[in-house]
Image: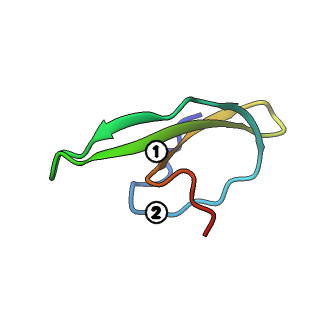
């Protein structure tokens, strides 16, 4: 399911669903300063079995 037509990158969105998949941690480089930051994608499904991929950025081990 594509959320892009409903929200833009500055909106916050609440989602409710079941986590179906968690990717391994990847390293990406920021364009602005070439800093390497961790990223992990999770796939969430709702009761209709539609899925959305949610990227998680930054310190993925933090428990704040």
- Residue 29 left/right relative to 8: left
The answer to which image quadrant residue 51 occupies is: top right
Tag 1 secondary structure: loop
Residue 32 spot, x, y in % from top left: 15, 52
Residue 26 numbered mark, or none: none
Residue at 55% in and 29% down: 24
Residue 47 spot, x, y in % from top left: 84, 38
Q: Residue furthest right?
A: 47
Q: Is residue 60 above or below residue 21?
A: below
Count the marks: 2
Residue 38 spot, x, y in % from top left: 42, 43
Question: Colour scheme in the image?
Answer: rainbow
Look at the image and tell me in which quarter the N terminus lies.
top right
Tag 2 secondary structure: loop
Residue 26 spot, x, y in % from top left: 43, 32
Foreground of the two, 15 or 35: 35
- For disc 2, the neighbor class at 10 Å (few under 14, some 14 to 19, many from 20) is few
Foreground of the two, 48 or 62: 62
Residue at 43% in and 53% down: 58
Which residue is identified by label 2?
A: 11
Which residue is identified by label 1?
A: 5
> In the image, which is nearer the foreground, mark 1 or mark 2?
2
- For disc 1, the neighbor class at 10 Å (few under 14, some 14 to 19, many from 20) is few
The answer to which image quadrant residue 31 occupies is: top left
The answer to which image quadrant residue 17 occupies is: top right
Labels 1 and 2 touching (C-beta < 8 A): no
- Residue 14 left/right relative to 47: left
- Residue 20 left/right relative to 3: right
Q: Is residue 1 above or below residue 3?
A: above
Q: CA distance from mark 1 to mark 2?
A: 12 Å
Q: Is residue 52 above or below residue 34?
A: above
Q: Residue furthest bottom?
A: 64
């Amino acid at each position: 399911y594509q959320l892009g037509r409903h929200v833009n990158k500055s909106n916050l969105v609440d989602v409710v669903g079941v986590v179906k998949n968690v990717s391994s941690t990847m390293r990406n480089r920021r364009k602005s300063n070439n800093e390497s930051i961790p990223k992990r994608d999770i796939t969430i499904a709702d009761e209709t079995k539609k899925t959305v991929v949610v990227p998680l950025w930054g310190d993925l081990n933090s428990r704040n």
